[in-house]
Image (tube, rainbow, N blue to C red):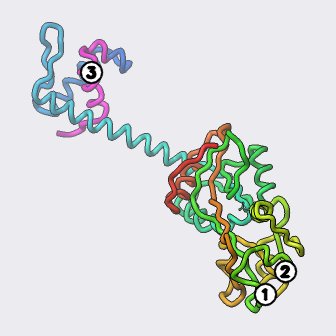
Amino acid sequence: MNALTFRLLEVFQRVVDLGSITAASTSLSLSQPTVSLQLKKLSSQIGMPLIEQHQGSIIMTDAGHAVYRCAQEVLTAHARLNSQIAALQGVEVGSLKLAVVTTAKYVIPPLLSEFCRAHPNIEINFTVGNRAQIIQRLTDNKDDLYIFSQPPEDAELVCYPFAENKLQVVAPCNYSGPNNCQLADLAEEKFLLREPGSGTRRLVDQYCRQNGVILNKVMIVESNEAIRLSVASGLGLAILSQHTLANSRQDDLKTLDIKDFPLKSHWQVVTHKRRPISLAASAFRDSLIDAFNQPEKITK
Ligand code: PGA
């Protein structure tokens, strides 16, 4: 059997499904003689008759039934292949605009670089800013995906949590002040805190407000990295995400044992309902959720 083509199988399937050569030829935009010719060709390639006409109806022979089953499998597989290829092309040639809060830059780059290796033709636009700056981008509809630990309250957001974010109280390694205590017991220590507008700062302020803690000596430093290095060189204490500590030498900093700490929140990958999610963005979102195994969706 040679030259058994998708087209021959499609014509045969259509004739059987519609019950007549006339209906099949209309539906395939072919002439009736062409459809009859294709049926003959298929039948001669198989080497057996495939249909019989009986009182105006089409009846399949046993060989016809076998060919019909084969046509269904082949054409379904072909359609599935086409849609998979279309989806892959959509991911491969798309673009991804991703905006993340500064602390998430410790979490996202390894996953983003893996994603870029798997999809080298996707154009990536990666923006980092504090929580307030990223909320502004979200309001201006600038990006496909956003990463927050505290997304703004907005019923139009779709948020998937994918990993934990833990804030720790850290001190220089030679620190000898209060430890194994409450945050209030550190009220007179000097704290290096992130700027208002930072999500980390927001969580700290929230905790202090809810627990009546006032930190009396606060110095604002607008960068996790600068805070970490300043604490290591003895400038004061800080409350930082555990992710920011991953690169520090073990003897640089000491994590204090403070009641209620670590403060926990969740990294969330966020989209806005008004912006249709591109295939590339949805593939990256899936890769984040898969990497941390947290499939539950939160719709605000
Ligand atoms: P930040 O955000 O980098 O602005 O502090 C961190 C967060 O939202 O937890």
Q: Position of residue 222 (x, y in %)?
A: 84, 69
Q: CA distance from mark 1 to mark 2?
A: 8 Å
Rendered image: mark on residue 177? 1
As for residue 84 lying within the magenta part, the answer is no
Rendered image: mark on residue 17? 3
Q: Horizontal placement of 176 versus 113: left or right?
A: right
Q: Position of residue 60 (x, y in %)?
A: 14, 22
Q: Is mark 3 within 8 Å of ligand 1?
A: no
Q: Read off the residue under disc 2.
A: 189
Which of the two marks, 3 or 2, is nearer to us in this view? 2
Asked if the residue under mark 2 is in contact with the one under mark 3, i.e. CB atoms within 8 Å, the reply is no
- Magenta part of the chain: 1-24
Hey, what amino acid is under mark 1?
Gly
Q: CA distance from mark 3 to mark 2?
A: 81 Å
Which part of the image, by quadrant, shows the C terminus?
top right
Asked if the residue under mark 1 is in contact with the one under mark 3, i.e. CB atoms within 8 Å, the reply is no
Crowd band around label 2 with a 10 angstrom C-alpha radius: few (<14), some (14–19), many (20+):
some
Occupied quadrant, residue 156: top right
Tag 2 or tag 1, which sits nearer the N-term? 1
Tag 2 or tag 3, which sits nearer the N-term? 3
**Residue plotted at (66% across, 48% down):** 144
